[in-house]
Image (cartoon, rainbow, N blue to C red):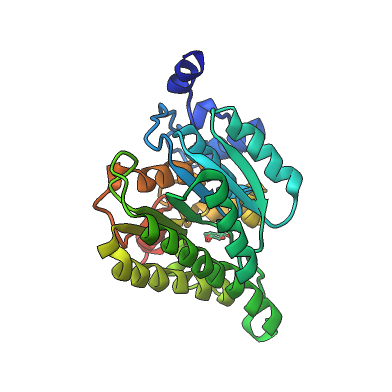
Amino acid sequence: ETMNETLETAVVSGRGRVLPAAEEALMQQHLREENLPEAVLPACPVNRVLKGQKALVTGANSGIGRAVALALAHAGADVVVNYVSRPEAAEEVVREARRCGARVYAHRADVSKEAEVEAMFRRMVGEFGTIDILVNNAGLQRDAPVDEMSLADWRFVLDVNLTGQFLCAREAIREYKRRGVRREVSCAAGKIICMSSVHEVIPWAGHVNYAASKGGVMLMMKSIAQEVAPHRIRVNSVCPGAVRTPINMEAWGTPEAYRELMKLIPYKRIGEPDDIGRAVVWLASDESDYIHGASLYVDGGMTLYPGFETGG
Ligand code: BGC
C-alpha cells in the first residue's frame, strides 16, 4: 500500500530526477543568451500501465537503455536488464528498478551472437514465464570518414545495431506466436520497440556504418510489422534525436558544442533519456494499441530540416 502511494506520486523525469546542476545551467544559459524562454522538463505522474508485463531491454546498463528499463519498471513491468560489458552498471539499474517493486535481473549477452540471444530468451521464459515487451535498444557508433573506415568497424556496427535487433525480434516473435493474446495482460500478443534514430532518414557524413544500420532498422521494423500484424504482434520504432548520453558526449559536453547542437534542434533543448523512456512506455502500452509499423521521432524537431529556418 505504502509502496503504491509513493509510486503514484513519484515522477519519472524532469524536476523529479534532477539534472546535474552544471548541465541544467548550460542548457538554461544558452536559452538566456538567445533570448528564449527557459526550458522546463516534464514532471509526469507515473501510471502503472504495464502492470505485470514482462519486458526485455537490450543495452540497458547505460544511456537510453537504462532510462527505458527504469521507465518500464516504474510503469509496473518486470524487467530483464541486458548488457554486454560493465556488469556493475547493470546491477545498479537492477537495484534501482527493484525499488519500483519490479522483478528484475541482469543478463549478459552479446545481441549479435545467435546462441547468446537464444539463451537469453530461454532464461527469460524460464524465470518470468514469457515476454510481453522487447525493447531492441543495444547500439553503438564507430565513426570514421568513409575512406578510412575499416571493414571491421563497418561490420561491428551493422552486427550490433541491425543483426542484433533481428536476432532478438525473431526470438520474441517465436514466443509471441506460441503464447498468443492474454486479454487480461494486453490487447496484443506482444510488442517490439526498435530503438532507431533520426539517422534512419537523416544522412550522416562520417557515420556511414551507423546511418546504414538505422536505415536498415527502419525497413526491417516495417517489414516485420507488416508480416506479424495478423498475429496481433505490434512492432514500432522510437527514433531519438540528440539525447544526453555517453554516446554523443562531444556534442553536448562544452558550451561551444552545445551551441552548435542547438542549431539542429528547433525545440532548443537537448533530449533527456527520460524523454525516450516515456515514449517507449506509451508505445508498449495498450494506450497506443492501433499504432503499428510507425517510426516515432522523439527529437525536438531535428527532422524538420532546421537549416531552412533561415535559408531556402
Ligand atoms: C546518435 C547521436 C547523435 C544523434 C543526433 C543519434 O542516433 O547516436 O550520436 O547525437 O543521433 O544526431
In the figure, is residue 17 to the left or right of 38? right
Q: Is residue 247 above or below residue 288?
A: below
In the figure, is residue 140 to the left or right of 4? right
The residue sitting at 43% across, 56% down in the picture is 193
In the figure, is residue 123 to the left or right of 84? left
To which quarter of the image does residue 58 belong? bottom right
Q: Is residue 58 above or below residue 274?
A: below
Quarter of the figure with the C terminus: bottom left
The residue sitting at 58% across, 76% down in the picture is 209
The residue sitting at 59% across, 39% down in the picture is 104
Residue 288 horizontal/vertical position (percent): 29, 47
Choose between 7 and 127: the one closer to the eye: 127
Callout count? 0
The residue sitting at 24% across, 52% down in the picture is 290
Q: Residue furthest bottom?
A: 147
In the figure, is residue 126 to the left or right of 264? right
Q: Residue furthest top?
A: 2
Task: Work out whether residue 271 can be spotted.
Answer: no
Choose between 182 and 151: the one closer to the eye: 182
Residue 270 horizontal/vertical position (percent): 52, 46
Task: Tell me the quadrant of ligand 1.
Answer: bottom right
Residue 274 horizontal/vertical position (percent): 50, 40
Choose between 87 and 45: the one closer to the eye: 87
Task: Work out whether residue 167 can be spotted.
Answer: yes
